[in-house]
Every structure is written in structure tokens, then in C-alpha cells.
Image: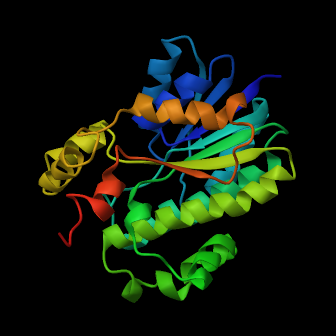
């Protein structure tokens, strides 16, 4: 029986990670847009990978459970990568919370029930959650520990308390990091690990659209004034993923790795600081 890598989110970052880690495995590529899943599968298949595209809506527990069931029918679920989500310019704040916050929480919970011993998981979060002001300890615990089906009922996540789509996105990414910590404890009982990575601006087709869109100057200013002086690439995210998902990261679980070319450092202590 083959070992299975389940990739949720058929984009450039997810594919880079799957190509780095999925050789010799059955790669199940899940996306709400099945055409996107097929496109990634075509590229990977032509590079020698064993791939299977499936449709999955991260906003639906039923769809998540069905996708996991499909993956398990093909082998032992050994690795999970969540690279799905919607950005602040792609959707209203309610959709961002439903997909990025609720959906990711459900996925971690459901995969954690069946991940194989020695298995690993990774959530692709975002630098954005690191720049939001600190929450209270009580709010952090609510994001971390509230049952997934009750998350969207939390007072802090009600529409009147979410300023705009960027705030919704930041809350979702903060929640991702907290849920990873909680799930690491549960996954550990199965001998498995789960971490997150928080990339900065990574060049993808979506990012290029953003560079050329109404927020383009904002993004270009961000990577121009970060210490690295440039945006990152999907393969650089895969470099970190390789550590976190592989044997060399065996002592790492429940952690988040910020990799943004120093943009967050510049935001707090350098030329990106909005108060300077």
C-alpha cells in the first residue's frame, strides 16, 4: 500500500511542496476548482509523480471528510499540506473567515483523527497574522480551543468586530497558528507532527495579479523595503517545508516559521513601520 500525500490547494506553493516531498508517494491534489487540481496534476504527472485530482471545498466539513476518505482509499495518509485559502482582495470577510479560519481548523481536526503514525502536516499560513496587534490571552485561547463548529460564533469574529477583509485574513492566520499548537498535542498522541509556515510575499500568478492591481504599490513597497529587498519564491517555501515535513524536523511540532524576507521586522522596527 502506497503512502499518501494530501495537498489541499492546487497552487504554486502547494505544488512546490508536493514536488519536494511527494516522490514515491500517491499525491492527492484537492481543490475547490477541479480544473486547478487537474492543471497541477498534469505538470506533476509529466515530471514522473503519481497524482490524483479531487474536488474539495475547504469551507465544508462534509467535503473535507469526503476528500480525506478518498485519500485513505488510495493508501496510508502519511503527509498533509494545507495551502488553500482566499486572500483579502479575493473575497468578502465572511468568506475569508469561513474558508481560511473555520475550514483549516476542520481539516486539521479531521486529518488528526486518522494521520498515520510518523505522519506529518503543514499549514501554509501568512506573515499577515504576525503584524496584527496582540490579542488577549483569553482571545488566543478561544481561537485555539473553541470547537470548530462554534468558531464563527465567537464575539471577536462577528462582522461588526472585523474591520475589513485584511483584518479577517489576519484573524484567520492567527487562528491557524493557534490551532496548529493545539492539534500538535493531539497529533502527538498518534506519533505524528503538525507545524505551520508563514510566508511573506511569494511570486505566484495570484501575486503577480496583486502587483498589477489596486494594491500593487503597497506590495511592491513592502518587498522593496524589507531586508531581503525582493519577494520570495514558492521553492523557498518548499525549502522550509522540507525541514518541517521530513525526518530532520523530527523534534519540531506545534511551531510556526515566519519567512518573509524580514518584512515583519521592518514593519515593527524599520522603514515599513507605519508610524515612522
Q: Position of residue 27 (x, y in %)?
A: 62, 28
Q: Is residue 53 visible?
A: no
Is residue 56 shown left or right of residue 131?
A: right
Residue 156 against residue 88 in the figure, above or below: below
Q: Is residue 214 above or below residue 75?
A: below
Measured as percent of width and height from the top left, residue 228 is found at 29, 39
Question: Which residue is at a point 52% across and 88% down the rendered structure image?
Answer: 155
* 151, 36: nearer the viewer: 151
Q: Spot the residue most to the front.
A: 269
Residue under the image location 65 percent in, 35 percent down: 245
Total of numbered circles in the picture?
Answer: 0
User: Is residue 226 depicted above or below 230 in this figure?
Assistant: below
The quadrant of the image that shows the N terminus is top right
Q: Quadrant of residue 35?
A: top left
The colour style of the image is: rainbow
Of residues 264 and 123, the one drawn nearer to the viewer in this rendering:
264
> Looking at the image, which residue is at 30% across and 57% down?
90
In the image, taking residue 1 as reference, residue 269 lies left or right, namely: left
- Residue 165, how many percent across, how many down? 32, 69
Q: Is residue 208 visible?
A: yes
Identified at 17% across, 69% down, the residue is 276
Amino acid at each position: 500500500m502506497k503512502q499518501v500525500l494530501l495537498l489541499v490547494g492546487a497552487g504554486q506553493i502547494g505544488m512546490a511542496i508536493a514536488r519536494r516531498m511527494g516522490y514515491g508517494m500517491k499525491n492527492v491534489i484537492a481543490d475547490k476548482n477541479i480544473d486547478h487540481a487537474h492543471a497541477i496534476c498534469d505538470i506533476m504527472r509529466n515530471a514522473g509523480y503519481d497524482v490524483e485530482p479531487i474536488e474539495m471545498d475547504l469551507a465544508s466539513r462534509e467535503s473535507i471528510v469526503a476528500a480525506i476518505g478518498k485519500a485513505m482509499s488510495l493508501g496510508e495518509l502519511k503527509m498533509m499540506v494545507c495551502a488553500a485559502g482566499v486572500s483579502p482582495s479575493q473575497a468578502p470577510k465572511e468568506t475569508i473567515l469561513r474558508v481560511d479560519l473555520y475550514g483549516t481548523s476542520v481539516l486539521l481536526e479531521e486529518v488528526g483523527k486518522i494521520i498515520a503514525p510518523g505522519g506529518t502536516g503543514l499549514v501554509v499560513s501568512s506573515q499577515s497574522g504576525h503584524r496584527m496587534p496582540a490579542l488577549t490571552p483569553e482571545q488566543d485561547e478561544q481561537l485555539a480551543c473553541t470547537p470548530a463548529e462554534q468558531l464563527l460564533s465567537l464575539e471577536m469574529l462577528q462582522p461588526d468586530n472585523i474591520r475589513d477583509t485584511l483584518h479577517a485574513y489576519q484573524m484567520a492566520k492567527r487562528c491557524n497558528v493557534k490551532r496548529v499548537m493545539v492539534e500538535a498535542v493531539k497529533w502527538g498522541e498518534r506519533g505524528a507532527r503538525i507545524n505551520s509556515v508563514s510566508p511573506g510575499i511569494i511570486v505566484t500568478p495570484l501575486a503577480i495579479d496583486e502587483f498589477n492591481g489596486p494594491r500593487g504599490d503597497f506590495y511592491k513597497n513592502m518587498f522593496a523595503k524589507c531586508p531581503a529587498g525582493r519577494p520570495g519564491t514558492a521553492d523557498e517555501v518548499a525549502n522550509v517545508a522540507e525541514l518541517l515535513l521530513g525526518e530532520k524536523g523530527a523534534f519540531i511540532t506545534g511551531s510556526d516559521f515566519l519567512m518573509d524576507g524580514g518584512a515583519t521586522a521592518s514593519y515593527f522596527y524599520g522603514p515599513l513601520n507605519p508610524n515612522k
